[in-house]
Image (spheres, rainbow, N blue to C red):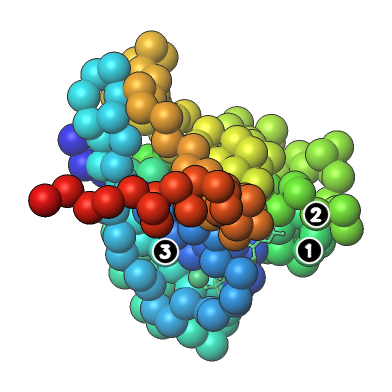
Amino acid sequence: MEFKLVILGEGGVGKTSFVQRHISGEFVKKYEPTHGADVSTVSFSTNKGEIHFKCWDVAGQNEFTGFQDGYYIKADCAIIMFDVSSRLSYKQIPIWYKNLIRVSPNVKVVICANKVDLRTRQVKAKDVVFHRKHNLQYYEMSTKSTENYEKPFEYLAKSLLKDNKVHFTKTIAKTPPNVKNIRKTFNKEVFEKALNTPLPE
Ligand SMILES: Nc1nc2c(ncn2[C@@H]2O[C@H](COP(=O)(O)OP(=O)(O)OP(=O)(O)O)[C@@H](O)[C@H]2O)c(=O)[nH]1
Ligand SMILES: [Mg+2]
């Protein structure tokens, strides 16, 4: 099963990092604004078979958005993301939503608050009311720490397959590569032993 997912929200909220985190497990530290849209597939194994999300990761910065409406056509679902350290990114949510619904009125939408790992949180949980008015699902997450980062996909899977029992079967939280830990596992004793072990004939 494949579904078209559009990922929207202001520039810098973390849309591309979110998709990359799911695809490679890596957390992208550097911010490079998306131009137009990047399309890539994020897949999950579920108790009801595989599910593939064709993700349209759309540019958030005005100057790079390009043909926005074109990206929204025939979308099955959407993630509209904001950044809890940016009030502006939350304020813009209604505009992203309105533009999307105009093109694809039946799309399943999840509102996501990203970067909850930050101490400089500006938008508190109680300030977030938009989803209630429109009866939308809402998650707080962090692409950096991976907290809740699979939740939006799991909710959409349940919703698109119209089955509340759908859940992801494989562990999908990829551990971020941690250089320090890799160094720690460099054990001198093990290394020397390996060095002194003769190679097989
Ligand atoms: N602290 C923290 N930083 C994050 C998180 N997610 C993304 N970032 C950072 O936010 C910055 C912007 O991320 P992008 O994913 O490129 O933003 P984008 O939404 O794709 O931006 P546009 O392509 O311009 O629309 C990067 O420096 C990321 O490292 C998170 O959960 N926590
Ligand atoms: Mg991007």
Q: Position of residue 11 (x, y in %)?
A: 61, 72
Q: Position of residue 74 (x, y in %)?
A: 27, 52
Dot 2 falls on a residue whose secondary structure is loop
Is 91 rendered above or below residue 169? below
Residue found at the far left of this picture? 201
Give the residue number, with chain letter if any, for mark 3.
57
| Among the 4 quarters of the image, the one containing residue 112 | top right
Tag 2–tag 1 contact (CB < 8 Å): no
Q: Residue at x 31, y 64 (%)?
A: 39
Label 2 sits on what residue type?
Answer: Leu
Q: Position of residue 98 (x, y in %)?
A: 54, 56
| Among the 4 quarters of the image, the one containing residue 62 | bottom right
Label 1 sits on what residue type?
Answer: Ser
Dot 3 falls on a residue whose secondary structure is strand
Q: Tag 3 or tag 2, which sits nearer the N-term?
A: 3
Give the residue number, with chain letter if any, for mark 2.
118
Q: Residue at x 24, y 19 (%)?
A: 48
Q: Is residue 121 left or right of residue 53?
A: right
Does residue 102 appear anywhere in the picture?
no
Residue found at the far top of this picture? 165
Tag 2–tag 3 contact (CB < 8 Å): no
Numbered disc total: 3
Assess mark 3: CB under 8 A from ligand 2? yes
Give the residue number, with chain letter if any, for mark 1.
86
